[in-house]
Amino acid sequence: MVVLGSSAHFHATAPGLFVGIDLGTSGLRLVAVDGSGLAVATASQTWPVAASEQDPAQWLASLEKLWKPLIRELPGPVLAVSATSTSGTVLPTDCKGRPIASAWLYSDRRGSELGARFGIPAGWGLSRWLWWQLQGSTDCRLTHPSDYLLTALGAKVGWTDHTCALKSGYDPAAGKWSLALAAGVPAAQLPAVVRPGTVVGTLAPEWGLGSGVKLVAGCTDGVAGQIASGALAVGQVCLSLGSTLIFKGVSEAKIASADGAVYSHLHPDGRLWLPGAASACGGAILEKFYPREQWEELNGCAEALNRPTGQTAYPLATPGERFPRSGADFAGGLPDVPTEDPHFYAGLLEGVAFVERLGLERLMALGMPVQGALLCVGGGTHSEVWLRIRAAVLGRELQLPAQVQPALGAAILAAAGVWGVGVAQAAARMVRLDRQILPDAALAAAYEAVYRRFLERWGGAG
Ligand SMILES: Nc1ncnc2c1ncn2[C@@H]1O[C@H](COP(=O)(O)OP(=O)(O)O)[C@@H](O)[C@H]1O
Ligand SMILES: O=C(CO)[C@H](O)[C@H](O)COP(=O)(O)O
């Protein structure tokens, strides 16, 4: 499905636009914003969620389909474009940057046993890359989806950014491909690494915006969501509830867990770290049980129920979890009422909120600083009742940026590249908070007791 949109007004004070592209699990999204972060046009296309591969020809076809109508909508000149994509997804290309196979998604388990022998954390793209090489295709270059899209738009070949590079075996502290090289990946397959926000080329004329539009290195979708939330100072936390649940904070020190499920990206501005982790428990569970058209009605039913429902689910759409529990076979558990019962839907919302709290507590125990309100982004923020449940379970104020999408994070990187400023500085100009959700004290107390039971059931180490 293709959706186009445009904003009714345009900030005349900001003479130039920035386009952010988000190549996600469930589709492609484009946003054009002005220098104050106001969206002036959007376009998106959804596609069926694949477990293992995506076809780069499909990405390009979607980009071409969305690009023309988007640029027709624009009330001013575009200054720069950047892109974000799923973290851990790898794409083999030839030396000219042309794909030579499908992209292997972050959720594809091929290579995981092989990777474990080299100490590669579960889910990292490096394991898939090793597996790909075993198939005999060694004359190829390791590329990430966002690098590829920018190359297709005209950027030079042979680079990636340090956030996409992390799960492909790059050590941002040392500035070296340490893990990839130790696992035996030939250096010739590995791209040069740049900081997100670095100008990597100019838009090719066939994309219809004239000359001089800068192409700017992007980042992973988790980091883009964090940039879009503005959570870039020490102690700030971004919770991104989309198909998955991504936790990200900001710290002075690098934080990691022994199994690699908790890791730290280098802050795009350097020096600080972005510790975090991702859970497979997230919004995908709703997709599994209910068509999207029913969600609003179900939210209304959940609103009308007496909450807490008393359910202590750990909802996973498919077996396999990374954090706060871990295990390829870990299957979690669903609410113990029929799916037609509104308590089932509400129990799913509550279960995700409990997992979110457990995740946050585990990150804090590892030393991640958490100060003030939590910033929330991702499709899950479209549900009011879910936001109120999350605020009560977490016992903290939630804040929502006006735009809750990773594509804005990419647009902010594009602006930082053109303005020649740090990403935090660009975000301070472009991220606007929309509203806050305060935890209801009585509800929070009631959820505390249910969370204790959730912990007895799921709070183990595994
Ligand atoms: N109205 C809604 N009510 C409840 N959940 C919603 C609603 N709209 C979106 N969501 C949640 O957001 C998820 C999609 O989030 P999104 O950030 O768009 O996806 P992705 O992670 O694939 O990029 C859905 O799976 C669903 O759980
Ligand atoms: O689950 C994901 C797939 O969309 C996220 O990309 C991911 O795990 C977050 O990764 P990162 O912290 O590297 O951005």
Image (spheres, helix red, strand yellow):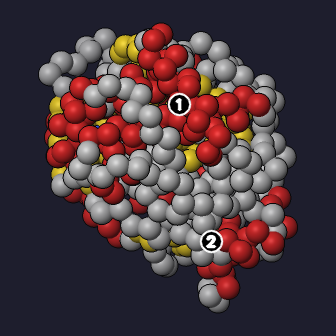
Residue 61 in percent (x, y) is at 28, 64
Q: Nearer the viewer, residue 424 or 78?
A: 424
The residue indicated by pointer 1 is 450
Find residue 304 and report its image quarter: top left
Say which quadrant the N terminus sits in.
bottom left
Q: Which mark is residue 128?
A: 2
Q: Residue at x 21, y 30 (%)?
A: 300
Percent coordinates x, y for residue 228 in the rendering: 46, 29
Q: Quadrant of ligand 1?
A: top left
**Residue 394: quadrant of the picture:** top right
- Mark 2, Cα crowd under 10 Å, few <14 / some 14-19 / many 20+, is many
N-term mark: 2 or 1:
2
The nearer-to-camera label among 2 and 1 is 1
Q: Secondary structure at mark 2?
A: helix
In the image, residue 131 sits, relative to residue 210, either above or below, namely below
Residue 342 horizontal side relative to residue 309, left or right: left
Kind of residue indicated by mark 2: Arg
Identity of the residue drawn at 78% across and 58% down: 177
Horizontal placement of 332 versus 350: left or right? right
